[in-house]
Image (cartoon, rainbow, N blue to C red):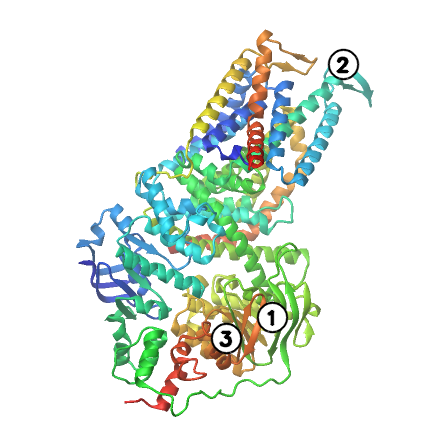
Amino acid sequence: MKAFAAYHPIVLFFYYIAVLIFAMITMHPVLLAASTAGAVLLFICMYARRPKVIAKNLLYYLFLFLLLSAVNPLFSHDGERILFFMNGNAVTLEAIIYGAAIALLMISVMFWCKCYNEVMTSDKFLYLFGKAIPKLSLILSMALRFLPLFKSQIGKIHQAQKTMGLYTGDSFVEKIRSSFRVFGAILTWSLENAVDTADSMKARGYGMKGRTNFSVFTFRLRDGILLAVILALSGFLAVGIRGGAFWFQYYPYIAGAYTGNLQIFYDIAAFLLMMLPAAIEVKENVKWKLLKSKI
Amino acid sequence: MEIVKIENLSFTYPERQQKALDQVNLKIQAGEFVVICGESGCGKTTLLRMLKREMAPHGEKSGEITYCQTRLEDLDERTAAGEIGFVMQNPEHQIVTDKVWHELSFGLENLGVPTQVIRRRVGEMSCFFGIHPWFKKKTTELSGGQKQLLNLAAVMVMNPKLLILDEPASQLDPIAASDFIRTLQKLNMELGLTIVLVEHRLEDVFPLADKAVIMEKGRVLYAGPPQQAGQALKNIDSRHNMLLGLPSAVRIYNGLSVEDTCPLTVKEGRDFLDRHFDNHTCAAMESPRRHKDTGEYAIEAKNLWFRYERDLPDIIEGLDLKVRKGEFLSILGGNGSGKTTLLSILAGQKKAYQGRLSIWGKKIKTYKNNELYKHNLALLPQNPQQLFLKSTVQSDYVEICRVMGYSKEETKEHIEKSLSLLGIAHLAGQHPYDLSGGEQQKAALGKILLLKPSILLMDEPTKGIDACSKHNLTRILKDLKDQGLTILMVTHDVEFAAENSDRCGMIFDHQLLSVDVPEVFFSDNNFYTTAANRIARHMYKNAITCQDVITMCTRNGGCP
Amino acid sequence: MNTVKKAIRILLLLGGIPLLILLGATAWNDRRYQLVTMGIAVLSVIPFFLTFERREANTRKLVLVAVLTAISVAGRFIFGPVPFFKPVTAVTILTAIYFGPEAGFLTGSFSAVVSNMFFGQGPWTPFQMFSWGMIGFLAGVLNHRGWMKQRPMLLTYGVLSGIMYSFVMDVWTVLNYDGSFGTAGYLAALASAVPVTAVYCVSNVVFLLALEKPVGERLMRMKKKYGI
């Protein structure tokens, strides 16, 4: 399901900026937990049809989590509550917890980025930057087009070399040498043919003043609503952070802020923001199931 | 109204002596469909590029071009970019962006058209061209024909009044090519668009044209109705090279001296034969003596199966093939029928997962390293550019000689022989990419021949080359065959296969069907046959080339 | 004159980054450097992009940069099986030598973006953009009097750029792991990255040696034939 990805690129972009900032700005356990849960859930929603991928990723990052939590106390000996000594060095509770927190931060960022790659496809990326940096985004667009083209041409040149008897053996040096030959050939091919591309651009009037920017994306009401929700939640959280709501320290002893009655609202806001995309995916899924059952 | 007027136009490229264009005078009326033809290097591409200001080559120019009574230089940039559209030869490299919708809107964005208008125009054009099913696709996922259609549509959204096309269909397979030409006809008929088209394959294009322009060495030889083009050429030189490139009906007409209007299409050709000739004396062409089966096989394939990946469907299903020693075998087949795949299996690039394949009676698996490719089997790929690795033809050749382990004297001798056989000695010092399509083809073939192969595999050797280069290739291949080379070619080009092969076969439904001598092969086919055969099949059996038809007509003699 | 301006800009950028880090450190007593440095990496590429946007573009040069970007990324597929052995740096440096600092910067930084579109974007993208872009830019500036066309200079630069790349990327490693930036941590990261850095340097030298002539020839040809 890709209900979240169907929103307008601007909304998606703002969301990612907000999430990455809030995920990395403090190491408060509530924010970390919210961010990790949101990222992992979104990832699961997006790969719902490929359970193998989900399982592989979850296992890998679980391993990483355990490893980092275990490794940190070996290097860091700060902290008050000493659990035991190893080789004459103290292993502290704080260090273990800090290691776990760092690991969560890393894992949540990794999962956000994995989802980002799925959601922000190249055309959305180009659309976002097309207005601000039109020339550069055109270069990017061209490079993205060339790459698959070059890849298939590389395969062909490789085969052609083989039938010309240029491979004399299977040794490593031979492979490297032929790689360089292929590289040279693909370079010539691409540079020479690029002139056609440039001509075709000029023929269609590229380079005149007052270029406009077309896109297939339309900003709908639901995009506006989602954007407003994101901005409101982010604003609220920002106020909370300024007020010290998410202050947290690990060394020398663990201590967190408690800003009174509002704290619970800040925590809820954090969870809401981080869970938004996963919630949208789930909602859409349920809606379709209902529609289907009615038919 | 004249939309374009060219007066005394001459052009010389920098550091060249010879003029690329020499005193060209031409008028093009609004709504006209003009076809320009000529051998490669005759200046037709230069002329087209001169008509499009943004693409005009640098060099010394004299004379004048006017567009709608305004000198081309004086046009404002928006008119120049928008009203004159240009489509080039290679479908791949004209595409700029990575998405179809973005490519379509690219020109309008450049013109600064507002988004709402772009949306409408792009939508309208996608419907006209039938692009909407793949509107949101990536441009790299399209087929060659779709790519070229996209290029055309991307120009058409800008609402041009004059459309210039430089061999737009030459890289397409015949079906995609005639679809493309039909689209051009639709644009001309329904929108009254003025079209100037350069094309080698005139079979489809000639009947559509209002005006044919024939060029040679930078000069216009003929400009007028296509019906009289053949006669005009004949008057200049009865063995003129350009005559080879004309549609079959015109060539048959030219080969016979009959007072009548020149037929252009197959239908007109049939009527023409009916009116003037009969088949009382002899109705069937006797088969010339072709290659005999000696029981010795260059390639023997039995029950080959191939697929790209485990979960994908089979491309080749239980294919059997025997290529006799010393014969020229052509394999025809539609797009995506697996012709190229078959060739790469035979060349050892891909492995069949089942079946037996032996080269010269020895299993292909038992050839070690590059043994298979020395003095044995060579493959000429579809795009000759894949073969060039160095900055001159000469150094490319030297590298191959090094691989072959030739001594210095041998290297020199072999290279000289190769160059002279192909008639490209004057190109040895040039950069391979500076050569024309036909020259590249020859240079690539020369490189392959340095491997001293006994079997030559060719993948569509006639793609994108003009009639004259084709004629040259025929001659070269005949020489090679006389020297004992076994040739296997896969192609779309029925005319070329009919003229050259000892046997022809067709791939359909992943299998090889009916391998037979061309006379029988083509006479049995209804659609998949040469235009000459379609013109004359109701009168003469086994006549498949234009020359065959002419021979039969002369033998029977005309009726009053 | 132009080069002087450019040199000043580099100095500002190079000096500005530690300054910004310092600012970030004092403003954020929480010591969350990740965001600050990521922001810096992003900010530091912006001036280059904007100057390029503002100037009149040569269409052919635009396409050329796109081609070279795609080529340097495609190189990762050609030389796929060998880890850390990538032609990106070499292609970037050679582009800069033949087409100037700007083309070098763009090719370098875009190679990072495009290759990450296939191998996965992450917080490291801005750092890669910055370091590859800078490698290209500096190569172009140093080539002012054709210095970079001398082989010893070129190879030395190849080694230096391997080290430079490692230095910048280790900032990211340290920040990612520690969340704070300490000299000790940084040195430790640098030390642990020595083998990888060595591979970078060696691969840069190998690629420069192998590609110098063929790539140079081809780029020269483009320059002459099409006047780019």
- Residue A27, position in %: x, y? 62, 20
Q: Residues within 10 Å of mark 2 (few under 14, many from 20)?
A: some
Label 1: chain letter: B
- Closer to viewer: mark 3 or mark 2: 2
Q: Give the residue at mark 3.
A: B418
Label 2: chain letter: A
- Closer to viewer: mark 2 or mark 1: 2
Name the kind of residue labelled 1 in the image: Met
Mark 3 or mark 1: whose residue is earlier in sequence: 1
In-front residue for pair A82/A293: A293
Name the kind of residue labelled 2 in the image: Arg
x 64%, y 70%: residue = B372
Dot 2 lies on which element? Answer: loop
Q: Is residue C219 above or below residue A5?
A: below
In the rendered view of the protein, which quadrant contains the C terminus of chain B?
A: bottom left
In-front residue for pair A286/B369: A286
Q: Give the side of residue A93 with respect to residue B496, left or right.
A: right
Q: Give the residue at mark 1.
A: B404
Q: Is residue B451 above or below residue A153?
A: below
Name the kind of residue labelled 3 in the image: Ser
Answer whether residue B458 is visible to the viewer in this image.
Answer: yes
Structural distance between the alpha carbons of marks 3 and 1 = 15 Å
- Residue A228, position in %: x, y? 46, 22
In-front residue for pair A8/B536: B536
Q: Give the residue at mark 2.
A: A81
Label 3: chain letter: B
- Residue B32, position in %: x, y? 24, 62
Q: Give the side of residue A138 with respect to residue C182, left or right.
A: left
